Image (cartoon, rainbow, N blue to C red):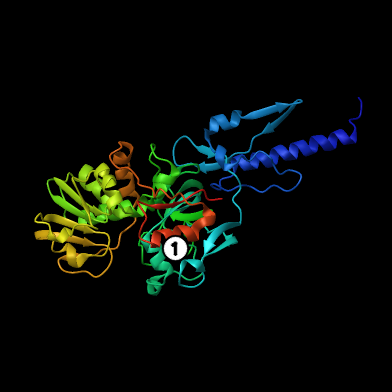
Amino acid sequence: MHAVPRCHLQVRRAQSLRLVAMEAVLTSSVPSKTLSLPFPFQTPYLRPLSSIRSVSIRERNSTTRRRAGRVHRIPLVRASASSSTETVTAVSEIPAKMKAWVYGDYGAADLLRFDEGVWVPEVKEDQVLIKVVAAALNPVDYKRRQGKFKATDSPLPTVPGYDVAGVVVKVGSQVKNLKVGDEVYGNINEKALENPKQFGSLAEYTSVEEKLLALRPKNIDFVQAAGLPLAIETANEGLERSGFSAGKSILVLGGAGGVGSLVIQLAKHVFGASRVAATASTGKLDLLKSLGADLAIDYTKENFEELPEKFDVVYDAVGQCDKAVKAVKEAGSVVALTGAVTPPGFRFVVTSDGAVLSKLNTFIEDGKIKPVVDPKGPFPFSKLVEAFTHLESGRATGKVVIHPIP
């Protein structure tokens, strides 16, 4: 027998160790976690996030590449074992630190600073980690930054942002319905003013409770999806709390805004309003009609409170409750989102709920509800200060969206 050259034995041993190490990745029971292999066994096959796909265990076991007589297993990271067919998904490695916008004190928009060294937030058992594709701004974002809710705010420094649309890249051990690779959207803070997250959506990654998220509607992109969550939840909850139902009439103050544009559509196409009126400036009246308003009122030329027509519900998204109560029928309701509240007006703080978004997805996918994104956007991530300034000017139409995010 001929002795096998020692160099050949070393090569075979290295190949064997490489295969064993890669098999450990495949059989690891740790969800969504990339196994770090020591040099020289680190694998080059982990795919970028843009090529995420799910495959069955059966397909995984047959996924091999043969080159020059050698077999290279493609390592895939386990994502879910919640069903009879186990699923694994290829993902890129999650960094320890990320790019994000941060403020360390309360005040104006120019306090925001771009930081490339923010720690990626940890994922709790009931949470998922999202690679943010798009985010959106809401009035609550700048009011929080101004310190109006500091008594119940999270600690500073803060990464702002409530609305998010992105891709799940990691799941907690108690997550049941979402998996790595799912495209989702949602409002990441269950209670807008009660201890909102210190790590918001204006970053590369954000961690969110599964119950606050829904799958992205199939007919809209990430930019449109990012502009929906907080506004549509607010619009829907306000209508429900006001007792609005089929056959009733409604007046929407600020109908071209983020919330107002969705109140019009929900009232008309979901709740079954008999008549919808809304206010806006001269250049936005056609938008109101396209959304479903039967009566578009130019607030620069008419005083809505002096109209002879009265409404079952007035939804005030601009802070004119004192005038709104003059336009409501006896025993009617006035929803006041901002400013002083005059009886019978009432105020509420929205509760984020992924189940509500899932329910409304049907109407979005049917084309009955359409997101309205401000035409000046989307604003790139680098222009966040300009985006806030535009929103705070009060001249935005629909939602101010941030995209792309690195």
Instruction: List the residue tagged with mark 1.
Output: 197
Q: Residues within 10 Å of mark 1 (few under 14, many from 20)?
A: many
Q: Position of residue 96 (x, y in %)?
A: 61, 57
Q: Is residue 147 visible?
A: yes
In the image shown, does 135 or 318 lie closer to the viewer? 318
Q: Position of residue 394 (x, y in %)?
A: 35, 60
Indicate left or right for 213 with 285 as reference: right
Q: Residue furthest bottom?
A: 151
Indicate left or right for 172 with 152 as reference: right
Q: Position of residue 405 (x, y in %)?
A: 53, 50
Q: Residue furthest right?
A: 2
- Provide the secondary structure element on which disc 1 rests: loop
In the image shown, does 153 or 222 lie closer to the viewer? 222
In the image shown, does 75 or 264 lie closer to the viewer? 264
In the image shown, does 139 or 232 lie closer to the viewer? 139
Residue 334 to residue 63: above or below: below
Indicate left or right for 178 with 100 as reference: left
Q: Quadrant of residue 144?
A: bottom left
Q: Quadrant of residue 178?
A: top left
Indicate left or right for 73 with 352 as reference: right
* Quadrant, the N terminus: top right
Q: Is residue 203 visible?
A: no
> What residue is rendered at 46% in x and 69% in y?
108
Q: Residue furthest front?
A: 301
Q: Quadrant of residue 393?
A: bottom left
The amino acid beneath tag 1 is Lys
Q: How many marks?
A: 1
> What residue is rendered at 82% in x and 36% in y?
11
Q: Position of residue 292 (x, y in %)?
A: 23, 43
